[in-house]
Amino acid sequence: MLTLNIIGAGRVGQTLGRLWQQRGVFAIEDVLTRSVGTAQGACDYMGGGTAVVHLSALRPAAVWMLAVPDAQIAAVARALAATQPVHDHLAASAPTIFHCSGAQGANLLAPLVEKGWHAASAHCILSFASTGAALQQFPGTPCALEGDAVALALLQEAFTAIEARCFPVLSQDKLLYHAAAVFATNFLPVLQGMAEDAWRASGVPEDVLPGLRASLLANAVANITALGPQGALTGPAARGDAEAIATQAHAVRAWDAEAGAAYEALSALALRMAKASTESKATPASSR
Ligand SMILES: NC(=O)c1ccc[n+]([C@@H]2O[C@H](COP(=O)([O-])OP(=O)(O)OC[C@H]3O[C@@H](n4cnc5c(N)ncnc54)[C@H](OP(=O)(O)O)[C@@H]3O)[C@@H](O)[C@H]2O)c1
């Protein structure tokens, strides 16, 4: 079984480490975090590994997972490279290292590539809110892989073995790819928060809000899941009602300038989507 060293064992590191250890995909060797206490806690949770305190104390391993926060990846890669010997890139013994960031590419691992390592990034599209929840939710999680061919082949097999659904993403597309995930999930609470503030400002009683939140969100999720974004679009943009959009945008701007700008920008996108939907319905299926 291939050995795995883990640098950074928080929510993502512990979840993946435990799954790989449990399924016999990798044997966890050494685990490094910012303190020996958290590293030991991670080893206990994952059911394997030895907690170490310094990068220089990490023993050789076939695979290295860098699951530190994005802002730490480049610095840790540089510091790790300074402790490592040069490998023959073509030798079977050349180690593979990957980080888990969605927005950053494998190029952050360049100091190790210069030492002959294979490098990749592997981004699991799951909100790892806690290790316990993520462990239950992980099967079926899509995982975007990007990097060199040797690293990609190894990681494809390792992630598939823990029931991730892998797909490739090009290095130059990672920022846009990650921004898409921000649209898909991170902006939802922002939109909901803005809606609730506007309801409050327009006199909707506080005790009505939880019900509004639950029913509208549940309806939207059900409709988008069943019909896709275009099919689920309703409201003034879906009806092409530019006048209603303009008067509502004016009211929102008078209440909150930033919210008004967001309302206008999102309405323009909604109109574009409604137009595309109308055009695709008007095009005969045979000529699409
Ligand atoms: N959370 C998510 O939903 C999610 C989803 C997909 C991808 N990711 C990506 O996964 C990576 C890890 O995120 P996370 O949410 O697991 O982070 P996290 O829970 O905050 O854990 C970070 C880990 O890195 C350790 N660490 C921080 N700085 C370090 C350093 N300089 N040297 C060694 N260890 C260091 C921390 O040590 P201590 O334990 O001692 O604090 C901790 O173990 C990031 O690239 C993130 O973008 C996260």
Image (cartoon, helix red, strand yellow):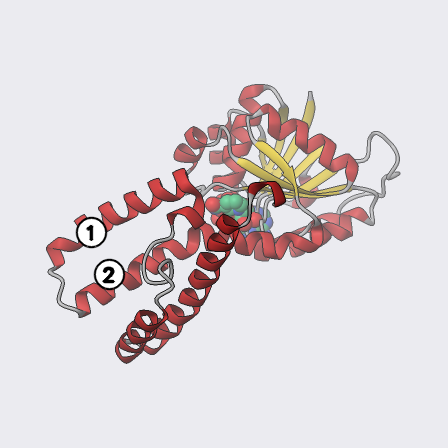
* Disc 1/disc 2 C-alpha distance (Å): 9 Å
In this picture, residue 181 sits left or right of residue 146: left
Give the residue pinned by disc 2.
Answer: 196
Residue 75 left/right relative to 214: right
Under mark 2, the amino acid is Glu
Is residue 155 in view from this perspective? yes
Mark closer to the chain start, 1 or 2: 2
Label drawn at residue 63: none
Q: Badges 1 and 2: C-beta atoms under 8 Å apart?
A: yes
Residue 194 image position (x, y, % from top left): 30, 64
Residue 22 vs residue 185, the one in the foreground? 185
Q: Residue at x 47, y 52 (%)?
A: 277
Q: Residue at x 52, y 31 (%)?
A: 43
**187 left or right, relative to 80:** left
Q: Is mark 1 within 8 Å of ligand 1?
A: no
Residue 125 in the image, given as x and y percentages of width and height? 52, 42
The residue indicated by pointer 1 is 212
The residue closer to the viewer here, 265 or 186, is 265
Of the residues shown, which amino acid type is indicated by label 1? Leu
Q: Nearer the viewer, residue 125 or 72?
A: 125
Q: Which residue is located at x 59 percent, y 44 percent?
A: 100
Secondary structure at badge 2 equals helix
| 25 on left or right of 238 | right
Secondary-structure class at tag 1: helix
Q: Is the residue marked by circle 1 packed among few (<14), some (14-19), or many (20+) residues within 10 Å?
A: few
Q: Quadrant of the N terminus?
A: top right
Dot 2 alpha-carbon crowd within 10 angstroms: few under 14, some 14 to 19, many 20 or more: some
Residue 160, x across and y down, in percent: 61, 27
